[in-house]
Amino acid sequence: MGTKPLDGKKISEDRKEYYGKLRGHSCAPLWENLAHLITPEPVITAIPYLWDYSEIREDLLHSAKVISAEEAERRVLMLENPTLEGKARITESMYAGLQLIMPGEVARAHRHSPAALRFIVEGSGGYTAVNGEKTYMEPGDFIITPSMAWHDHGNDGSDPVIWMDGLDLPLVNHIGAMFMDHYPDEQFPEGQPQGDSSVRYGNNMRPIGEGPDGLDSPIFSYPYSKSRETLEELSKTTEWDPYHGLKLEYIDPTSGGPAMSTISTFLQLLPKGFKTEKYQTTENTTYSVIEGKGRIIVNMGDSTKTIEWEDRDIFVVPCWYPHQLEADENATIFSFSDKVVQTKLGLYREHRGNK
Ligand code: 1HN
């Protein structure tokens, strides 16, 4: 913004002087800015990009030599979109990182207003406790830490445990409603027994008097063993969606709505040889590949960008980039996006096929 209009016309001296005076009064002329403030279609800074797990795994493991989980509080490599360096964003609206917890370590209890998800990438014996209810995590499991829920993590196993964190941090940051508390002890006191929330809410029943609150799912662990089996069974009887293959959304079973109130979460199966039709959405999506390999072909305007992915890679497709997914082997992919927020705000759009 400034005194140079977008169409490159020179500004007259009186206008310049007038604009200078306006700045002094904390005002600015809309007519000089309208064309780039309101664009016919999204103008996005973030770019489609892939983090090669085999490359960054080494960097992440090295972090354990540099800092302890105790000192770091959370030993995480943030995945920053190359065009959003220093902004802790993987896309315009979402944060993602890879967290490492070594055998015997504890990541101390805290809580904050941004909501978080964990998607387990590697290792067994890791656990997270949400308000004192502990859940062990296996690769492919999806775990929710709702806004302001106390949480700590640990590793009772013998190998490093690595997961992807996804947070709505940029959205909360933008709004300003940021809060964080540290629990006085390293771990939050043990609460409900392991598996309690799944028993209570995960069997198509619920204790009477306990209804949905419209926020996050009371089930905070969605094990891969179950979700993978669901995909597998459905794949035998369901027709493939030309734009998504077979894509399921994680839901809050008490409301039928999205599992999280600010982050949409999905698990998707693409059979070997499948290529999706061209698809464009305002969602900003981060993908974490669990099994298989293939590529995503993204339309960049004048050119196309092909990004090859395989298991454990993480890649992003920001808002409004037309794209197609292609699988060379049966592939399962987890993804998260801001769709639920956009939908609530009436902003969500998608376009199927060619224009
Ligand atoms: C956080 O609390 C965790 O609890 C992970 O594991 C990543 C990124 C930004 C802010 C807080 C965690 C985070 C985070």
Image (cartoon, grey):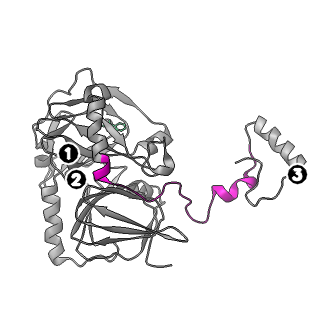
Residue underneath mark 3: 12
Foreground pick, 213 / 262:
262
- The Cα atoms of the two marked residues, 1 and 2, are separated by 9 Å
Dividing the picture into quarters, in which one does residue 108 lie?
top left
Q: How far across and down, in percent of the image, does residue 266 sit?
A: 28, 59
Q: How far across and down, in percent of the image, does residue 146 sit?
A: 30, 42
Q: Is residue 102 visible?
A: yes
SS for dot 3? loop
Question: In the rendered structure, does residue 34 fall within the stretch colored magenta?
Answer: yes
Q: Is residue 159 above or below residue 273?
A: above
- The Cα atoms of the two marked residues, 2 and 3, are separated by 62 Å
The disc label shown at residue 254, or none: 2
SS for dot 2? loop
Q: Which label sits in the foreground, 1 or 2? A: 2
Residues marked 1 and 3 touching at CB (< 8 Å): no
Per the rendered image, the range of residues in magenta is: 28-56
- Position of 11 with respect to 219 (left or right) is right
Q: At x 22% / y 53%, what residue is drawn?
A: 254
Locate ligand 1 by image quadrant: top left
Residues marked 1 and 2 touching at CB (< 8 Å): yes
Q: Which label sits in the foreground, 2 or 3? A: 3
- Position of 219 with respect to 88 (left or right) is left
Residue underneath mark 1: 210
